[in-house]
Amino acid sequence: MEGTGWADAHGDVLMDLAARRARGERKILASRYLEGYESAGLRLLVCSLFVEDRLVPRALQEALLQVGALLEEQEETPGRFRLCRCREELRETLERGELALVLSLEGVEPLGRDLGLLRVLRELGVCLMGLTWSRRNEAADGCVVEGTSPLRPGGLSPFGLDLVREAQRLGIVPDVSHLNDPGFEDVAALGGLFLASHSNCRALLDHPRNLTDSQIRAVAASGGVVGFNAHAPFVGGEGDPCDQMLRHLEHLVEVGGPDHAALGLDLCDPFFALAGEEPKDLFRSHEEAARCRGRLVERFGPHTTRKILRDNLVRVVEAALPD
């Protein structure tokens, strides 16, 4: 979104980079993504390390291949984006007007049951840690969504509790998107900063991927943010996509305050298309989402709009990166 640019707390581009590079493609970000990102004014993208179900047995290898793919892309396309692994790199990249990329885990399957691997991923640039995707792992249970097998849900396992404590020691910020309600309660009870990178409001759509008002307030009380998710099954409502986004952002601001709402668009349609599935996102691209900026300014004013679109998430990411 124009002007000072904007930030997105959740994107799944890394698995696409790794898969395409394995087939021999090169400069994939430059040829398939960067023009749209730059046209939209995107300046910060949190890139998730996500491992598909079929690849979970080799999750660590897959995560490392995704990091390697991004580093190779950076070498092939200098001067347009940067993997930022410390605050200074983030600030320099944003000041230059380039695209800053940071890493997050979407599910801790790459760690297995080894806390020591978290330090390794931290050194590679991981600064946010989503404990689960929508499945069970060694740390916790993901929330149940369509197509998953409901098991008796629980909170964080003993390993999961130790993992959050170790993440906090390392400065990695926990992410509760996809986590079930008992797991959310456990993370909140441990204290410290946490976020929900791509979750909406359960008061507007009663879906387990969305947050209750009390959960939104808990994220805000920690200093974190809740990123609006543009995946339509988690949005509800009908009509203009900007109106639907505004509805959730208004609720986030009302419940959590203007310093704790952000965007985590989770634009997955390109990946659904590869699988032959119908589009499921409110927006086909970041460029489409950027057209809503004027509506946000009309509703919130320029100062709060800048917080929602950029400053709130940048603050959390800065806190998650080392000096």
Image (cartoon, grey):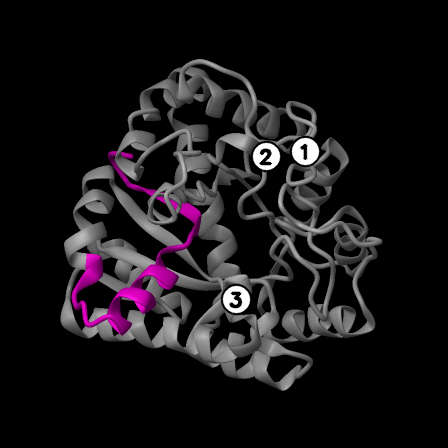
- Residue 292 locus on image (x, y percent): 34, 24
Residue closer to the observer: 141 or 319: 141
Report crowding for label 2: few under 14, some 14 to 19, many 20 or more residues within 10 A (C-alpha). many
Q: Is residue 38 magenta?
A: no
Q: Amino acid at mark 3?
A: Arg
Q: Secondary structure at mark 3?
A: helix
Give how far apart the Cα atoms at labels 1 and 3 are: 26 Å
* Residue drawn where x is 77% and y is 74% of the image: 159
Q: Are marks 1 and 3 in contact (CB under 8 Å)?
A: no
- Residue 178 locus on image (x, y percent): 63, 50
The vertical placement of 100 against 263, above or below, is below
* Residue drawn where x is 36% and y is 62% of the image: 14
- Residue 55 locus on image (x, y percent): 50, 70
Locate residue 322 relative to residue 194 in the image: left or right: left
Q: Which residue is mark 2?
A: 200
Q: Residue at the front extreme?
A: 276
Q: Amino acid at mark 2?
A: Asn
Locate residue 103 relative to residue 4 in the image: left or right: right
Q: Quadrant of the C terminus?
A: bottom left
Give how far apart the Cα atoms at labels 3 and 2 are: 28 Å
Q: Which residues are magenta?
A: 1-29
Q: Quadrant of the N terminus?
A: top left
Q: Nearer the viewer, mark 3 or mark 2?
A: 3
Q: Which residue is mark 1?
A: 207
